[in-house]
Amino acid sequence: MTAANFAASSPDRTVARVRLRPTMTSDLEFVLSLEQDTENLAFITPWERTQHEAAIRFPDFRHFIIEGGPGLDAVGFLILIGCRSQNQSLELKRMVVSAKGSGFGRAALRVAKKVAFDDLGAHRLWLDLKARNTRAKALYDGEGFVVEGQLREAVKVSDGFESLIVMSMLRPEFTGRRSLGLEMFA
Ligand SMILES: CC(C)(COP(=O)(O)OP(=O)(O)OC[C@H]1O[C@@H](n2cnc3c(N)ncnc32)[C@H](O)[C@@H]1OP(=O)(O)O)[C@@H](O)C(=O)NCCC(=O)NCCS
């Protein structure tokens, strides 16, 4: 698969420049270290190396490195699953960026939506997030994802159980946003 390279900008806000490229085995130290960063551990369930290795190979998965900044360095990763789903329902399984609050998350999400709907034929793109993940919630709200509901106390955490919020975007919602100039890339 070729890299998806977009300098994203839109009428609503300026979006950082990012590029997605397929993750390689040699990237996995970076991926695993990001997952193990305490800043991220509270919001994700880290995988074993073998799970990432499988995700790189398995055709139903797309495992991407997010490259950004002036030198297009690796700034994060994201994983799409269900890419061969008969229901055309894809999941944004995980997205993590290293330099938070720099716009890389929003820009990468824009590219991920384009890949899902334009390249992979998604009808529905969904995700879940921990209820306490206010930063991710603000991002997904702002990028047009709709709350479907909660999986109540679905995840065991150190101080008890935490609920998961399920959010999704449907193709007509994506095309509607695009027609409003909210999904544009320069
Ligand atoms: C969630 C994550 C991917 C977002 O990426 P990011 O690059 O930090 O986010 P951006 O800089 O693109 O900001 C996007 C929006 O997030 C929200 N946001 C950013 N920082 C925030 C903060 N400290 N508090 C609350 N909301 C915040 C804002 O709505 C922001 O939009 P704005 O800049 O137009 O106001 C990233 O923070 C991350 O890796 N978090 C840890 C792992 C994780 O939670 N992954 C998602 C699991 S579902």
Image: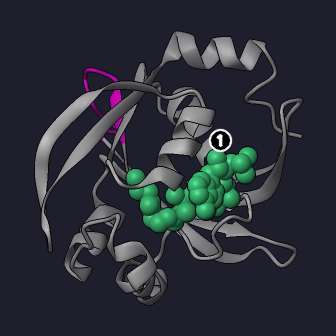
Disc 1 target residue: 110
How did the renderer colour the structure?
Answer: one colour
Q: Position of residue 1 (x, y in %)?
A: 55, 54
Residue at image coords 30%, 63%: 55
83 is within the stretch colored magenta: yes
Task: Indicate the quadrant of ligand 1 in the picture.
Answer: bottom right
94 is within the stretch colored magenta: no
Q: Looking at this view, is 164 or 84 the one in front?
A: 164
Whether residue 67 appears in this view of the structure is yes
Is residue 186 left or right of 47 when viewed as pictured?
Answer: right
Q: Using the image, determine if residue 79 lies above or below residue 147.
A: below
Q: Using the image, determine if residue 128 lies above or below residue 114.
A: below
Residue at image coords 48%, 44%: 137
Q: What element carries label 1?
A: helix
Q: How crowded is mark 1: few (under 14 residues within 10 Å), some or many (20 or more)?
A: many
Q: Quadrant of the C terminus?
A: top right
Residue at image coords 42%, 88%: 33
Snapshot quadrant of residue 71 = bottom right
Q: What kind of secondary structure does the magenta stretch mostly adopt?
A: loop
Q: Where is residue 20 in the image (x, y as percent from the top left)?
A: 63, 58
Snapshot quadrant of residue 37 = bottom left
Q: Looking at this view, is 126 or 26 the one in front?
A: 126
Is residue 123 left or right of 22 when viewed as pictured?
Answer: left
Q: Using the image, determine if residue 7 lies above or below residue 41.
A: above
Range of the magenta residues? Answer: 82-91
Is residue 29 left or right of 98 when viewed as pictured?
Answer: left
Total numbered badges shown on the rendered structure: 1
